[in-house]
Image (cartoon, helix red, strand yellow):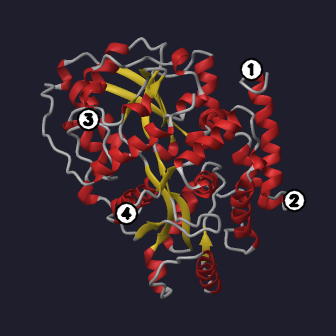
């Protein structure tokens, strides 16, 4: 399924508007004493990086007030996709599957595995219903209307200590900043072994290199119908080569092939490393895990984007319901409760964001002020484009085991440039699309 760029942009505009509006509503649900209700236990699976304290608080309140417990299995990020697919295909998946929407629909077929939730009363309050939509139906409960945007997250205390008072405006200025940090014994840029992190450089960069929604849509259409191949667009290889140059210049931690994401965040908080390319959801996670830290974000200058475009994320964390569940009525009751401010506000108490349900408070006052300021600035000037993963999400099942691995391996092997990586990935695409019987490969 390829999502319409116009709908992506519409979602972004809606998001920009919600940033400047305070969420309202009090509501609540007088549930009575949980001890008076029969105990029901649900099961779920969630990535380690997304086992947020806000979700945990909602789960704890549910058990206390309603005597409904959810036993979430917390799974390392790099194991999650394969385990999720295996369990769904073998009909051994838990009741609830936590994932990024709408990326989930490229990983597995929602019509085969998940329950459509269109008739639920809370659907009328959803701000960005397109995130969970597949072939006209909606297959998940999303907490947020967007994960924000991608950019360079940096430790402000490190910058202040180094006397860095102005952010770089050109690629040369960015390199000069990195050289200064490196000379003073600080690793400029963090890369962990979790492949979903380094790929952010490319999913952001490829869209920035093309520059507009229309150009990204045209690129994706031609790639996905075999009218063109990745290396027909030399700017795609240029994005990768600029990423690889960071390793050649010694700006990246040497143990990038083995160090975990959690360890990297600790080094960032301690000031051992200064920056990580990520998304605003990563920034809020760092602030949640290290409340005494001082981090913020900027859109880094690159050599392939003359317009200074911002890559945003029309994605959000949500929960899909396994078709095999025997507890569907209870799950529907849970989602009804979670759509009220009494529960929904808990999700945003420690990590502010953009609620997907009207009336829930995203804790805008607690949000890093640079997030809405940057986003609104780029939105108002029309310099925004979705990350590339959204345009070519048909290929999402390939990413974790092919392209993202190539991004991580290439610097250590030293024999692959951007063109070689894309040639290698093109072979994976050809095989995958041929097996699917896709247009242009049959």
Q: Please say whether residue 334 is visible from this viewpoint.
A: yes
Name the residue rendered at 51%, 86% in the picture.
Answer: 162
The residue that mark 2 highlights is 415
Q: Is residue 228 toward the left or the right of residue 194 in the image?
A: right
Residue 290: give x, y in percent of width and height.
Answer: 41, 63
Q: CA distance from mark 1 to mark 2?
A: 33 Å
- Residue 283 position, x and y percent, is 44, 59
Q: CA distance from mark 4 to mark 3?
A: 38 Å
Closer to viewer: mark 1 or mark 2? 1
Q: CA distance from mark 2 to mark 4?
A: 40 Å
Q: Which label lies toward us, 4 or 3?
A: 4
Residue lying furthest right: 415
Helix or strand or loop: what does disc 3 sit on? helix
Q: Earlier in the sequence, mark 2 or mark 4?
A: 4
Quarter of the rendering occupied by the N terminus: top right
Structural distance between the alpha carbons of marks 3 and 2 = 53 Å
Residues marked 4 and 3 touching at CB (< 8 Å): no
Q: Residue shown at 36%/41% (left/top)? A: 144
Q: Residues within 10 Å of mark 3 (few under 14, many from 20)?
A: some
Q: Which residue is mark 4?
A: 377
Work out whether mark 1 precedes mark 2 in sequence or the reverse, and give the earlier one: 2
Where in the figure is residue 313, as x and y percent of width and height? Answer: 47, 47
Q: Tags 2 and 4 in contact by the CB under 8 Å rule?
A: no
Q: Identify residue for label 3.
A: 61
Comparing labels 3 and 1, the label whose residue is closer to the camera: 1
- Dot in front, 3 or 2: 2
The vertical placement of 399 against 114, above or below, is below
Residue 437 numbered tag: 1
């Amino acid at each position: 399924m390829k999502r319409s760029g116009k709908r992506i942009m519409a979602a972004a505009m809606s998001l920009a508007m919600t940033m400047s509006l305070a969420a309202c509503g009090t509501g609540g649900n007088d549930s009575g004493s949980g001890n008076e209700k029969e105990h029901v236990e649900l099961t779920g699976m969630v990535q380690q990086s997304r086992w947020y304290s806000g979700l945990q608080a909602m789960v704890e309140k549910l058990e206390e007030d309603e005597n409904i417990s959810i036993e979430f299995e917390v799974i390392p990020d790099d194991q999650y996709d394969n385990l999720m697919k295996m369990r769904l295909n073998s009909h051994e998946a838990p009741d609830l599957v936590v994932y990024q929407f709408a990326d989930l629909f490229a990983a597995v077929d929602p019509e085969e595995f998940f329950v459509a939730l269109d008739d639920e009363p809370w659907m009328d309050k959803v701000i960005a219903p397109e995130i969970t939509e597949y072939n006209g139906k909606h297959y998940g409960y999303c907490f947020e209307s967007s994960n924000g945007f991608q950019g360079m997250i940096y430790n402000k205390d490190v910058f202040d200590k180094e006397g860095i008072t102005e952010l770089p405006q050109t690629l040369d200025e960015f390199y000069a900043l990195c050289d200064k940090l490196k000379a003073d014994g600080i690793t400029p840029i963090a890369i962990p072994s979790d492949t979903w992190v380094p790929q952010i450089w490319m999913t952001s960069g490829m869209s920035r290199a093309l520059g507009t929604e229309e150009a990204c849509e045209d690129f994706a259409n031609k790639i996905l119908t075999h009218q063109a191949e990745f290396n027909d667009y030399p700017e795609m290889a240029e994005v990768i080569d600029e990423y690889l140059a960071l390793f050649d210049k010694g700006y990246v931690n040497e143990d990038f092939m083995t160090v975990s994401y959690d360890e990297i965040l600790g080094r960032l908080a301690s000031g051992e490393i200064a920056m990580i390319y990520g998304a605003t959801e990563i920034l809020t996670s760092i602030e949640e895990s290290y409340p005494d830290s001082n981090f913020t974000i900027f859109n880094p200058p690159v050599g392939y984007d003359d317009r200074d475009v911002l890559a945003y994320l029309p994605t959000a964390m949500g929960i899909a319901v396994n078709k095999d569940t025997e507890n569907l009525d209870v799950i529907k009751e849970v989602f009804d409760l979670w759509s009220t401010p009494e529960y929904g506000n808990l999700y945003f108490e420690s990590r502010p964001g953009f609620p997907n349900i009207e009336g829930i408070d995203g804790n805008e006052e607690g949000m890093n002020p640079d997030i809405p300021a940057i986003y609104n600035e780029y939105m108002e000037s029309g310099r925004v484009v979705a990350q590339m993963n959204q345009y070519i999400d048909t290929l999402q099942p390939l990413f974790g085991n092919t392209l993202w691995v190539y991004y991580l391996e290439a610097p250590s092997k030293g024999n692959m440039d951007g063109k070689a990586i894309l040639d290698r990935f093109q072979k994976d695409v050809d095989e995958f699309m041929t097996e699917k019987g896709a247009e242009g490969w049959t």
